[in-house]
């Protein structure tokens, strides 16, 4: 290589010096501007101002259109702002830059789940297994989505695949057992017997196992119907629908199976009118079918028609506890606390061994804060002694103790309720309020966030966010989408 002359070196040194001087007078570099924009966006997002966060991140994209960090933040803030349309746009741009990964497959699945486009979400959850075939959450999401689509066999396939990876997962054992229960006795008993190890699945598993032990000689359609009723008692609406569907395959014109199929659909927010009306047409005088029709009308908001049917049923059979409990529930919808309490008490009196009616009564005292200081505590205390393994009743007892100024006993019972069922909406919510009352705010916030992200009842989700706001805690983007997305 030819060597440079001294004059050339000096000439370039002068030029470099002039460039350095000029650079010192230039505006702030773009990287610093972008950093400031990201900081403003992060602050807005942390404060729950998601629209402003989106605005800031979009401004950053004008400077750096292919910045993967910005695109990722826009996906998150769009989801938190419930702008799934924007989230998909930015996810598409993000994957164009980085390519697909299991993490991004999960983000896509979360978005499509939020849009209730379950079939597409399923495909992305499945794709996310490519590099992580033992991803427990992905399998859970696949099962949940398949059940929501009534893809019963597909859900069972995913469960059985997961059980090959983790044969001791009580959740999978429980779900697989309930899916098999209407048609395969031996495997069901094996799965559910193992699921008993987890307290939160124990009551539901025991209900189904009791069906088998009490009715060993039933024909398959009748046994499937009984399994469906047990699943309704457990609040397993989707799996109950499956059981009633199996029952109708063997007995297509069974009015009770039809009526309860419609009810299980109603409980999921679907329309069960066709099944209930067909059941009424087949058996217009059947008291059980008419009872289900009353519940159907109450769920649909026609309390007048529901009460008309229930009044007739009550006249025909004045000692039916289920009718009394449903009348109480209708009056609760109507806001008549006096009549609700009267009918719930009657239901418990007519069926003193039925823990569901007992739980209805205990929850009504606590939820409406009625007479806790006098008869409420006494009634709930008696129910708690009788049904000592019912999480709802023990939760209500703990809260009632707190309301009358007995915090130490309250804490014992609230914590015991969570040990019985760690996912119970009411238990988690009231435990959070109690912990906040004794100064354990971090624990309270953690429990409320769990309710907000996982509650099965919208009412508790709303109560949780209200309590968080009153505590001065504003959920951030990850809190708000925590139910749908997972960490990479």
Image (tube, rainbow, N blue to C red):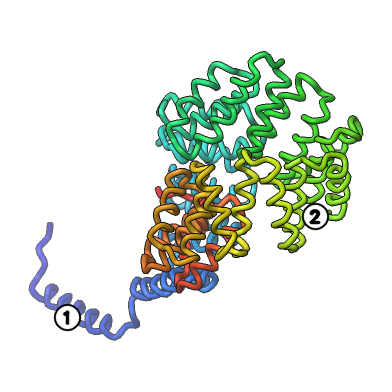
Q: What percent of the width, then of the height, locates residue 21?
A: 23, 84
For disc 1, the marked residue is 14
Rendered residue at 58%/50% (across/down): 456
Crowd rating for badge 2 (residues with CA inside 10 Å; few <14, some 14–19, many 20+) = few
Q: What percent of the width, then of the height, locates residue 375?
A: 59, 60
Q: Residue furthest bottom?
A: 25
Quarter of the figure with the N terminus: bottom left
Q: Is residue 93 visible from the viewing direction of this image?
A: no
Q: In the figure, 444 relative to 211: above or below? A: below
For disc 2, the marked residue is 301
Rendered residue at 73%/42% (across/down): 321
Q: Earlier in the sequence, mark 2 or mark 1?
A: 1
Q: Closest to the observer: 120 or 259?
A: 259
* Secondary element type, mark 2: loop
Rendered residue at 83%/54% (across/down): 302
Q: Closest to the observer: 315 or 172?
A: 315
Residue 312 located left or right of residue 7: right
Spatial CA distance of label 2 from label 1 is 85 Å
Q: What percent of the width, then of the height, locates residue 178?
A: 58, 29
Q: In the figure, 411 relative to 213: above or below? A: below
Q: In the figure, 208 relative to 406: above or below? A: above
């Amino acid at each position: 290589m030819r060597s440079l002359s001294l004059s050339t070196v000096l000439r370039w040194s002068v030029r470099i010096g002039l460039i350095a001087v000029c650079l010192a007078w230039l505006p702030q570099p773009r990287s610093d501007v972008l950093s400031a924009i990201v900081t403003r966006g992060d602050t807005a997002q942390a404060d729950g101002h998601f629209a402003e966060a989106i605005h800031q991140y979009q401004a950053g994209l004008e400077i750096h259109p292919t910045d993967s960090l910005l695109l990722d933040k826009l996906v998150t803030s769009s989801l938190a702002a419930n702008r799934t349309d924007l989230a998909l746009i930015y996810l598409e741009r993000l994957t164009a830059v980085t390519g697909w990964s299991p993490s991004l497959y999960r983000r896509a699945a979360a978005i499509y789940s939020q849009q209730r486009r379950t079939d597409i979400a399923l495909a992305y959850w499945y794709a996310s297994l490519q590099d992580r075939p033992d991803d427990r959450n992905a399998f859970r999401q696949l099962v949940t989505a398949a059940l929501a689509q009534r893809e019963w066999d597909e859900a069972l396939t995913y469960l059985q695949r997961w059980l090959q990876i983790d044969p001791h997962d009580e959740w999978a054992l429980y779900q697989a057992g309930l899916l098999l229960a209407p048609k395969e006795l031996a495997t069901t008993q094996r799965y559910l017997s193992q699921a008993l190890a987890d307290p939160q699945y124990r009551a539901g598993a025991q209900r189904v196992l009791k069906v088998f032990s009490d009715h060993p000689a039933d024909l398959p359609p009748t046994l499937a119907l009984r399994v469906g009723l047990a699943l309704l008692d457990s609040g397993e609406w989707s799996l109950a629908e499956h059981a009633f569907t199996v029952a109708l395959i063997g007995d297509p014109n069974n009015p009770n199976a039809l009526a309860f199929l419609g009810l299980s659909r109603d409980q999921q927010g679907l329309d069960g009118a066709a099944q209930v009306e067909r059941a009424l047409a087949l058996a217009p005088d059947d008291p059980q079918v008419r009872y289900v029709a009353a519940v159907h009308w109450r769920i649909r908001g026609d309390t007048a028609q529901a009460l008309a049917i229930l009044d007739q049923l009550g006249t025909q059979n004045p000692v039916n506890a289920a009718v009394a409990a449903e009348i109480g529930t209708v009056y609760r919808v109507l806001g008549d606390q006096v009549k609700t309490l009267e009918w719930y008490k009657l239901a418990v009196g007519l069926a003193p061994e039925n823990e569901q009616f007992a739980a209805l009564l205990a929850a009504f005292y606590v939820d409406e804060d009625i007479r806790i200081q006098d008869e409420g505590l006494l009634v709930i205390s008696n129910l708690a002694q009788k049904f000592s393994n019912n999480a709802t009743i023990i939760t209500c007892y703990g809260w009632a103790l707190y309301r009358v100024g007995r915090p130490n006993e309250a804490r014992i019972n609230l914590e015991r309720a969570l040990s019985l069922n760690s996912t119970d909406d009411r238990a988690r919510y009231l435990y959070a309020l109690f912990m906040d009352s004794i100064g354990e705010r971090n624990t309270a916030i953690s429990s409320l966030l769990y309710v907000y992200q996982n509650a099965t009842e919208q009412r508790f989700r709303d109560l949780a966010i209200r309590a968080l706001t009153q505590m001065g805690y504003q959920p951030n983007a990850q809190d708000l989408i925590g139910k749908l997305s997972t960490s990479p």
